[in-house]
Image (spheres, coloured by chain):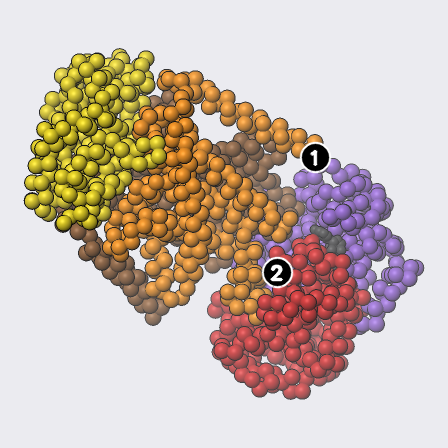
Chain colours: A orange, B brown, C purple, D red, E yellow
Amino acid sequence: MKNMRKTFGFVAALVIYSVFFYYVMTKDIGRAWNFEPFGAYSFFIFRGWLTTIYISFMALLLALFIGLILYLMEQTNFSVLHYLAVIHKNIIFGTPLLVIAIVAYYYIGNAFEIRSKILVGTITLGLYIGAYVSDIYKGAIESIHINQWQTAKMFGFTKFKTYRHIVFPQVIISILPPLAGQFALTIKGSALLSFMGTSEYYNRVNNVIANTYLTREGFLIMTLGYLLITIPLIKLVRYLEVRLNYKN
Amino acid sequence: MKNMRKTFGFVAALVIYSVFFYYVMTKDIGRAWNFEPFGAYSFFIFRGWLTTIYISFMALLLALFIGLILYLMEQTNFSVLHYLAVIHKNIIFGTPLLVIAIVAYYYIGNAFEIRSKILVGTITLGLYIGAYVSDIYKGAIESIHINQWQTAKMFGFTKFKTYRHIVFPQVIISILPPLAGQFALTIKGSALLSFMGTSEYYNRVNNVIANTYLTREGFLIMTLGYLLITIPLIKLVRYLEVRLNYKN
Amino acid sequence: MKLKIDNLVKKYDNKVILNELSMDIQDVQVLALIGASGSGKSTLLRLIAGLETFESGDIAINDDWMSREDIRDYRKKVGFVFQDHNLFSHLSIFENISLILEKVHGQKRTAFTSEILSLLTYFGLEEHKDKLPHQISGGQSQRASIARALAIKPEIILLDEPTSSLDPVLTWEVLYAIKKLVDEKKDVILVTHEIGFVKHVADYVIFLDEGQVIEQGRDILSNPKTEALQAFLGKVLSFA
Amino acid sequence: MKLKIDNLVKKYDNKVILNELSMDIQDVQVLALIGASGSGKSTLLRLIAGLETFESGDIAINDDWMSREDIRDYRKKVGFVFQDHNLFSHLSIFENISLILEKVHGQKRTAFTSEILSLLTYFGLEEHKDKLPHQISGGQSQRASIARALAIKPEIILLDEPTSSLDPVLTWEVLYAIKKLVDEKKDVILVTHEIGFVKHVADYVIFLDEGQVIEQGRDILSNPKTEALQAFLGKVLSFA
Amino acid sequence: GKEEEVLKVGMELKYPPFETVDEEGNPTGASVRLAEALGEYLDMKVEIIDTPYPSLIPALESGSIDIIISSMTITAARQEIVDFSDPYTTSQLMMLAHKDSKVKSPADLNDPEVIIASKSGTIGALWAAANAPLAQVLTLDEEVTAVLEVAQGNADVFIYDPLSIIRHQENYPDTTVAILEPLPNTQGWGIALRKGEDDEFKQQLNDFIQEAKTDGTYDAIRAEFLEDKIKEFEDQGLDFFF
Ligand SMILES: Nc1ncnc2c1ncn2[C@@H]1O[C@H](COP(=O)(O)OP(=O)(O)OP(=O)(O)O)[C@@H](O)[C@H]1O
Ligand SMILES: Nc1ncnc2c1ncn2[C@@H]1O[C@H](COP(=O)(O)OP(=O)(O)OP(=O)(O)O)[C@@H](O)[C@H]1O
Ligand SMILES: [Mg+2]
Ligand SMILES: [Mg+2]
């Protein structure tokens, strides 16, 4: 019964969206859809897609870690570290990804003679997303009741163990929802590597669009390709949300 | 004493960053800086900057509101609404801003004969950021202890009043930090309007770069322009974090 | 008060907590629920307050059967003191009370301020009125919780262990406050472990064990019939 | 135990809570702190546990003056029962104990499992061992908090109102558990409002009022000298 | 000799048939072949580096690439920042117009009511500023949106190269027309190199272009990549520019 209602709701929602986009499409003045030319490029595009997956997952792990470091730096009493984190975050928050990508590779990477675009791109993306992630941690940790900290202290937990065993398991459910969005941003953000001329998904689809002039089809393929990564990832996060929620 | 240490930390951090970027710049084999040609464009760029401020603030307010609606839709038992929100979020999470911008204006806007780019852009950006904001709300609200809900119920608070007077004031401190990042994303996200050919800041600086090829200078101006908006905004959020934190 | 409960069944995670519990009580002003820890006292109190759903059965207060529709209006007439106090953690002691009067009962700030202050003074909380719940002592937060429940001038007040963290002097004050309620013709349902307190204040006592009523009556404390209650009381008396 | 406190001053928000409090206690095994709500009992207990900083003064336990450096090792030897229980909200009752043994005391799961189980059984919690703190009754969570404090086999155990939510039967059990500790040569510092309980278990009593020691000794309960304590006790006795 | 030295050539591989990728993703197109011919001429290995348009100048300035061959039009403003070789083509600009627009020829452009769409970073906006100062200019980040502006009637014309104009017109046959009349005052495309770095190198580039035009290199490139285009141009009655 409940399952049926859920299924019905899902189908109804899907229909509403489909009707909406169908209506929009009928109003479009262009030509008919034509996916054929993409066939020849499928392997080319597919390899770019794999690159995107690789980069985004590495960057994602890095961002989770860098976010933690930044959070800890911001909390410390050692004020140089504190302000390093604050300045880093302010720069990241204020700078467009385009600029960050170009500065990171063509200026910073160049100065230190790092030539691997994948490496520079992954680190840059990790640093970029990490700044946002650190604020997610911060928000969640603020919500832990003072009692829990005090009890951990009383029973002899070190600061690290308190975070690891007491705080983290309690905040994970409030961290995961915003993190899902951040993960999606990371995956799409991996397109920043296209400014470095890396052959990832975004760049390659755009290459093909340029060759074939099939913009509409290209955008559809681009979106589907990203959805194919983001949807499973978000499903995974939602699953973890339920699994790791101690309240259930 | 404490203030001196803080100032010292800030200055030290700033010096470290400056040295880093100075080193990077010395490694660059390019020409000397040349800001002169931007002088002629300054009014042109300034008007774009104002447009960006206008759009991002409108979109930001909209996103806070849309995020709330999406959160409530996701929580409701009415499964059509629930899935409408879920599908919306999945689409937003998976689609590059470039594609969203173009579809929103040239397909959807066109189908409904909405010609105002500022309008379409603001709504689109609001819907886009709103999806991320709703997950920030969700994460924070998960952290409210069940006791607080029950007590509110007992004393006759309606659902709305419980959110308004009990839940919201308690979660605001865990919402604000990740929201700061989201605000910054909104401001930079307003560059999506440049895909629609609106003359906002990003677009205009890029125009000047295209005309003059002064990329380095253009990027610096672009970044400073955005920082000039994001830093005060983030300062404001941090201030609110302290002000609204009932624990202080 | 009249309280009628028919075959009330409440489960948590498929474990039966209240097991076809029934009672029919009339013309009682202060009803006390006693029983061992975990016997279901708090659960029963929450159900009477309409705070949780239950598997089956019915509850009527003053011949009014509880129903989904008018539950919110019903609750507005009920004051509740939670076992773990449950003050709103973001609000000062004063605001914990004022918010409810203002937002739920629609009263004006000018009208209730002095009333709240005298209530807080009565419970020795006047100097703590602007502190947050985590800044006051256990007994202070318990008193604040009682003051909050009384502030809405309830027709019926439910108290879950109202004196557990109070010293003897304050226990007397609470006892006195409850007696005042009785004089004002208000009804009280009380969960407590303080048998001495029950003797002073209650005119009807129900002894619960494992989710069922084992013994009930006006003078079961002085005249216990079941072995269970005798054993329970035995420990108390040997104490003082 | 020896407990020496010199001119201890503690403030919250510039309000003096403990006012140059001093004591020098020797050869006491169960020390009870009594006093009115808000008199500073919990605060003093937290300071003795090294949980909070203070303005000035010194604390020495068994001639060991408390210092920043070895505070963590000191705490590991101390069991603490918080007034509001403070169980870790994301861990089951069992895990609330096992986590500490495993992560802080470095014990092996195989070694402590049966020990924890028998401790939980002793406190009647075996069937609730996998529940989370918010799923158990007030008395159950208080017992879990006591079990947790005992599980680390502390040399000294500090209890803040350990029986406040317990029924008479269970109060006896806790009393008995504390007596067993005494037999095992462990030291106990106890904050409680249950004067009967204090009489049974404590061999030294300190009566606090407004952050100062008003009266102290081995038999101040049967032989109160100050008016304050007489009034305080007067209310208790008239109760049972 | 120079055998081991690598000449790094930056181009954005999104502009067929000049700079593009084949189905395996290898760089190909007329500019790629021209770069390779340049390598042979200089006796250097050539490496094509795909670089998006906004990154081309930073890449050149930082030394990530040595020259740019990316259908880049020579303008005075750009010459302040980079050096250009002599033009290797005479690039042309033409117009895609909305079917109802009053713009029928380049002469109609200088009119305050006319809206000219142009892709940012390309020459269209610059041309408009210099040659039709009264018209409104709309710059868009993406080519596709500029075309949509015209197709949906928001803009009058889109200024771009003839090849693309023809293609775009085929995509929106009902609402657009191609005005295949070259805009006046356009310069050709040049090879960009770092400013003032090496006059000798610049001279070599100019010599190469001179030679390639006559030694059959251009003919070969035309035959390989531009056959179709040339035919299209002839069909439209135009001269091809490469
Ligand atoms: N964090 C805090 N901020 C401000 N005041 C505080 C704080 N914690 C405690 N107090 C105040 O200090 C005084 C002593 O508190 P304490 O908890 O020690 O009392 P207590 O003797 O344990 O009382 P009870 O029997 O009610 O638990 C109280 O008046 C309380 O309001
Ligand atoms: N949310 C819950 N999930 C599972 N079990 C629960 C939950 N709440 C209460 N219980 C169980 O129901 C039983 C009765 O709980 P209740 O709180 O009513 O006891 P009580 O009589 O008030 O005890 P106490 O005197 O200790 O407060 C207990 O065994 C408790 O563990
Ligand atoms: Mg209870
Ligand atoms: Mg206390």
Residue D88's disc number: 2
How many numbered discs?
2
Residue B210 vs residue A221, the one in the foreground: A221
Residue A169 vs residue A138, the one in the foreground: A169
Q: Secondary structure at mark 1?
A: loop
Q: Residue at x 34, y 70 (%)?
A: B1
* Quadrant in which residue B45 is drawn: top left
* Quadrant in which residue A156 is drawn: bottom right
Q: Secondary structure at mark 2?
A: loop
Q: Residue at x 66, y 58 (%)?
A: D92
Q: Residue furthest right?
A: C225
Residue B230 picture location, percent across and down = 33, 46
- Three-letter amino acid code at the position of disc 1: Glu
Residue A190 picture location, percent across and down = 38, 43
Label 2 CA crowd tier, 10 Å (few <14, some 14–19, many 20+): many
The residue labelled by disc 1 is C69
